Structure formats: structure tokens, C-alpha cells
Amino acid sequence: MNIFFVAVGMGLCALVFLVLYRAIFGPGVFNRIAAISAVGTKTLIILLIIGYVYNRVDMFIDISMVYALLNFIGCIAAAKYLEMER
Amino acid sequence: MRLCRYFLYPTQPGVIEAMEVTLFIHAADDAFRILENAKAQAVGLLDTATRLTSETRWMEEKKLQTILKGAHETRSGIQSFVITFVMLMGFWALLSGKFDAFHLSLGVICSLIVAYLSHDLLFANVRVGDGRVIVRRFLAFIPWLLREIITSNFYVAYLALSPKMPIDPQIMRFKTKLESDISWVVLANSITLTPGTVTIDIADREFMVHALDRKTAAGLDTGEMEDRVAHIFMEADHIYIQDVLDVSRIFAELKRGM
Amino acid sequence: MIGKSDDIIIKTIARIFVPFLQLYALYVIMHGHYSPGGGFQGGVILGASMALLLITHGYDELKRRLPEGVLLLLGSLGVLIYAGIGLLCLILGGNYLDYSQLSVILGVDAAHARSLGILGVELGVGFTVMAIMYSIFFDISTGGILPEDQRREGRVEGER
């Protein structure tokens, strides 16, 4: 089971790089925001998988919750900033 | 039928008068029987309609009246403070997992602070009704939503992976019949959660939805999701009850006429 | 200038989220010595919840809830708590922030006193970080111009 989770984590890491391409080269700022948000969600799952592998889910679940909340608020703040700029 | 025959084949005047009276009595009888049948059918319909809305029936009469008007209310300060405090305390126990006196007292203090700071946020716009019904219906809504997400997930994967990529992106707008902000948000998030469709904006009760394909757009256009969300928050019930009340008024007038 | 948001989805989600977010921040502060986190992290989450409220409900709503004076007071109070506990340890004959000296005042053994001392210090750090974080966010977002000033000078911008 551990192997399975490690494999899933590696796959998600690869997907993060795919999304990172869109974040760096993506045309326009909206693509970048969406890409960063997607990277955030993937990081959250990777954190949980790391917690499972090290048998410390109770610690990593706190971190991942904070990550999700800050990701949400950051995304909204960026969107609000763009709305003000217009 | 008999009336027709009488008008088609007139006979002598004396006979006609006697026949006329009996025929008219027969005709009135028939009409009366048809009306009675219609009334019985209507009463049956009314019964089924009230049985359909029986879930909202067991609330108090006063609440029923307010539901009929589709009213919204802001809970009073003390009530919302207490409810928020209890919910936050439960959340604290879920997070902390330590139940000794020290940590529980910390939790009580923190919950009191947060409840004081933001007790009017959580219940700013509550629909009058029974909370238990809403919770039960919401829990029943989740499996359906999960099934919908999984099926459309496969469909979107097929669209993305097929070499020709037969997508047809389009933006559709539709007016909603939902009334409270919380139900708008549940519907919008359900639409966004379902792969292939994204809610862009809600303005003036009009949803603006981006759909990836004609099929997903058509699936949204049937309005099944909206009906289910309306069912959760008892938004459509009062419309049905209003219908029944209107019909019953018409029936009362019919009865008086008879 | 940050005004009220007219997006129903964001507004409602924020309305439901903010109390739980604040409680979570306090949990992170209070349980800093058991689980990851502590004063700084909890303070950041608390500041983020304030920022979310500011973005979605506007400045007036936030001012009604938490006036600027209270915010400054909290920020200074946090520093006072931190320095006060440190100085108390110094006065009691230990090093700066040597929590085990607090056992004389609190009447518990050294290990428990250390735990309580850390809790107090983290509370102070959390308050200060929250106040300063929120102030920085607010100052950057307004560019130093308060809505009151605009209103006084009679050039109110339209709602955004």
C-alpha cells in the first residue's frame, strides 16, 4: 500500500510540472492564476500522501488545511486585484 | 345524444313539449354527474398534492404561513450567538481531539471570542423552515451529485483524450427559480464541481455558465440539478402549496355555484 | 479602494467560512506546542480571515466588527505579553524567556510552567502578527487613503 501511495505522489509531482508550464509560459494572467490554484490543490494532496507515508497524518492534515485556506484566499485576492485594476 | 336526435327529427308540438322536459332533466342529470366526477378527481389531485408536500406539513401553522410567503429571516442575536457557539465548539473538539479540562476551557474561550466577533455572519440570511429537513435532504443530494460528477468526469476525459477533440465551448444563460443566496451558491458550486461546466457569474438571478460541449450544456438545460437544489432548500414547495391553495379556492367557488 | 464585492458566491462562501477560519487560527495558536504551527502561523491565518472579510464585505463592515483602535491595541498587547513574560523570567532570576522560572508564580512544576509560558508567548506573537499582517494588507490595498478621508473630501468612488 505504501508503494501505491508513493507512486501516486510521484505521478502528482509530474502533473505539477505540467501545470507549472502553463503558469510560466501561459498567455495572460488568468491562465497563470488558474495554474497556481491547480498547483495548490495538487500540493495539498501530495502533503497528505507524505503524511500517510510517514504515519503522521494528524500533523500533515493541519498543514494541508492551512495550505488550502491560504490558496483560496490568495486566489480571491489576486482576482480582486485584477478587478480593481480594470 | 338524445338532445341531438330531438333537434334533428322534430315531431308533433304536444309530444315535443313533454319530451323536451324529460330530455332536459336527463341532460341536467348527465351534466351534474360529470361535474361530480370532475370534483372527485380534483379532490383526489388535491389530496396527492398535499401528500407530496407532507414533509413540510408537520411544521407549525405559523411557520407554514411564513413558508407560503417564501419569507427570509435574520435570527435574533442571542439565538445565533448560541448556535454559532455550539457549532464552533463541535469544530474545536473535532480539531483538537484532547478532552481534558484545560484544552476544553481553552476551546470554550476561543469559541466565545469568535462567536462574539462573527455571530451575525453565519446566519445572515436563513430561510424560515426546519433545519433538520434541510440537512437530511442535503445528505440525500450528495450521492446523486457524486454519481453525476463521476459520469461527466469520464465524458470529459473522453473528450480530452480523443484525437479530434470534438469540443464545442459555449456560454449559456438561464434564469433561476431559486430564491436565497445559499441555494444559489449550492447550485453554482454543484455546476462547477461537475466537470465540463463552470459557473462564471450570478447576476440578477441569472446564471452564466460555460459549458465544454453541447451534451453537457443539454444536460444542464434539463434543470434537474436546479430542481434537486430547490428541493433541498424547500424553495419550490411553497410554489406547489400556493398552486394547491389557488385551485382549492376555485373549487370552493364551483361548489357554491352548484 | 476596496469596496463591497457584488459576487454572491464569494460573499456567501466567505460568510460561512470566516468563523471557522478564525477558530482554526486560534486552534493553531493554542496547540502550537503539540502540533505544527504556533503563534506566527496562527496569526497569519487570523490576518488572512480578516483580509477575506475585507475583500468580500468591504471596509465598513470590518470596521464595525473590529475597529482600527482595537487592532492597534491588540498588536501592542501582543508585544507587551511577549516582553512581559520574558522580563518576568529575568526578574525571577533566570534568563530572558526562561519559562521554568515561572513555576514559582504559577505554582506548578517546571515542565508544566514551561508549557504554559510557551502558550502565553505564542498568544502574544499571534495577536501581534494578526494585527500587523492585517494592517500591512489594508495599507497596501488602500494606498494609505482611508474611506473616511475620501468621504470628508467629497470624492467618493463608486462601488466596485
Image (tube, coloured by chain):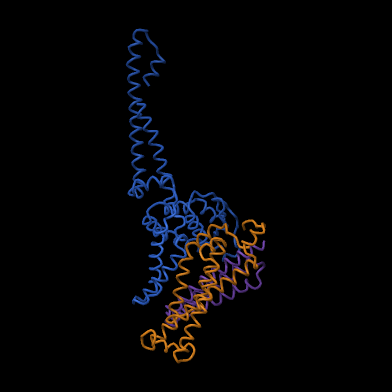
The N terminus of chain B appears in which quarter of the rendering? top left
**C146 sits left or right of C116 in the view:** right
Rendered colour, chain A: purple
Spot the orange chain and give its letter.
C
| Residue A60 in the image, given as x and y percentages of width and height | 46, 78
Q: Please tell me whether residue C55 is drawn above or below residue B34 in the rendered image.
A: below
- Tell me where residue B250 appears, x and y as whole percent: 40, 33
Q: Note whether residue A46 is visible.
A: no
* Residue shown at the point (36%, 40%) measured from the top left: B46
Q: Which chain is blue?
A: B
Q: Quadrant of residue A27?
A: bottom right
- In this rendering, would C87 be left or right of B16? right
Residue C137 location in percent, x, y?
Answer: 59, 70
Residue A58 to residue C20: above or below: below
Between B244 and C84, the residue placed more toward the observer is: C84
Q: Quadrant of residue C101?
A: bottom left
Q: Residue at x 60, y 64 (%)?
A: A80
Image quadrant holding the C terminus of chain B, namely: top left
